[in-house]
Image (cartoon, rainbow, N blue to C red):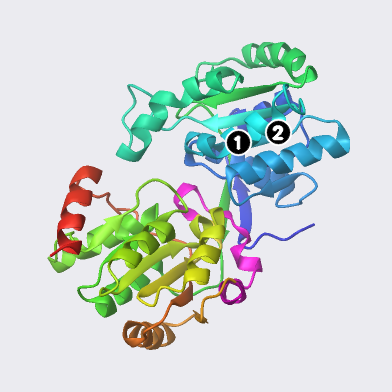
Amino acid sequence: MMQPSVNFTMRFWGDGKMKAEKLVEILGADFYTGVPDSQLKALCDYLMDRYGTDPKHHVIAANEGNCTALAAGYHLATGKVPVVYMQNSGEGNVINPVASLLSDKVYAIPCVFVIGWRGEPGIHDEPQHIYQGEVTLKLLEDMDIAYSVISKETAEDELAEKMEEFRGLLAAGKQAALVIRKGALEFDGRVRYENSNAMTREEIIKHIVEFTGDDPIVSTTGKASRELFEIREARGEGYGRDFLTVGSMGHASSIAFGIALQKADRKIWIIDGDGAALMHLGAMAVIGANKPGNLVHVVINNGAHETVGGMPTVAGQIDLVAVAKGCGYPYAVSVDSYAELDRELGQAKKRDGLSLIEVKCALGARADLGRPTTTPHENKKIFMRYLNS
């Protein structure tokens, strides 16, 4: 069995109904692949309990298109129906493999999608989820994927009946989806994700801010951007230096690269995460091939999708420095202490050349961590004004 990059332990309490377990029973599949989502945390934790990261049954993939193609390979090898789980933000990543691989007009490969519905109309959510929530069901319709919305009120027999209905479609080489509303799934087990790294992400970002000074920063999706925002607030520095990539996971490095090309006289910094970097790893190849000398790529690696629950990524099992060098980064290094981090940040600040710094990080964030109080539109305007000042 493949070991997860993040260790996990379990404890149980109570005798409540374990809806995630029932969902898996009704689905009747023995292969799951996906990208974790906070809306699907109960399912994700149950899959870790049942399978861990045994690749015969459960693969946490780099992105949703990766999952879909992997699921297709499973079906080709076994004739069985796989399950792909994801947040609705991942629908865009599956459009191509659904339309040109799975479709019954092409290879007719059946698949069940389990999709967490962030930004559901009428339910308060963060701005990056609002439009995605509005078009979630329409995108499924456009892809000719039959769906059923699962809520807290959905009974087991209703779900079983719907799956029986779907099985006819799946037998004909079509796809089906279960769209999961907020709070619809439960799991009575508790999974704890952890690693042996010592540095915390928020403290790492404080060190980065100390060395970057007035340089612009593009930060990745999730808690990193939230922490950067609060650090700026605590320092009374305003928010113009930072572009907070609150959505569009995996694209912060490309955004920063686009800026660096046009602002060659400015040092541009990326605060990236391991899950985000893996999601569109090809961006590193493009950056490495072009070698922008004013770009510093910092990847905070805790080996986990922490923002959505802590499930492991494969970043704890790969040599990210070797990947960067293989992609053409002329300088790449990994650090696991604040002294090493400060040394490398100082050298990157002065270096005329593309740099990557991997920072080994523990899991965890403050319980009272807030969210940006500026809107994405406001962030864009003040950042553009700062870039051009």
Is label 1 in contact with label 2 (beta carbons under 8 Å)? yes
Question: Against 23, is 305 above or below?
Answer: below
> Where are the magenta residues, as a range?
306-326
Disc on res. 96: 1
Percent x, y of residue 198: 47, 75
For residue 324, above or below residue 363: below
303 to the left or right of 198 = right
Verify whether residue 369 appears in magenta.
no
Q: Is residue 198 above or below residue 376?
A: below
Q: Is residue 187 visible?
A: no
> At 28% across and 57% down in the image, what residue appears?
243
Residue 181 image position (x, y, % from top left): 47, 26
| Amino acid of disc 1 | Asn
Residue 125: give x, y in percent of width and height.
33, 34
Residue 101: numbered disc? 2
Residue 138 drawn at (x, y percent): 48, 20
Is residue 323 located in the magenta-colored stretch of the structure? yes
Q: Is residue 219 left or right of residue 16?
A: left
- Figure quadrant of residue 354: bottom left
**Tag 2 secondary structure:** helix
- Sort mark 2 into few (<14), some (14-19) or many (20+) by Cα contacts within 10 Å: some
Q: Amino acid at mark 2?
A: Leu
Chain-order first, disc 1 or disc 2: 1
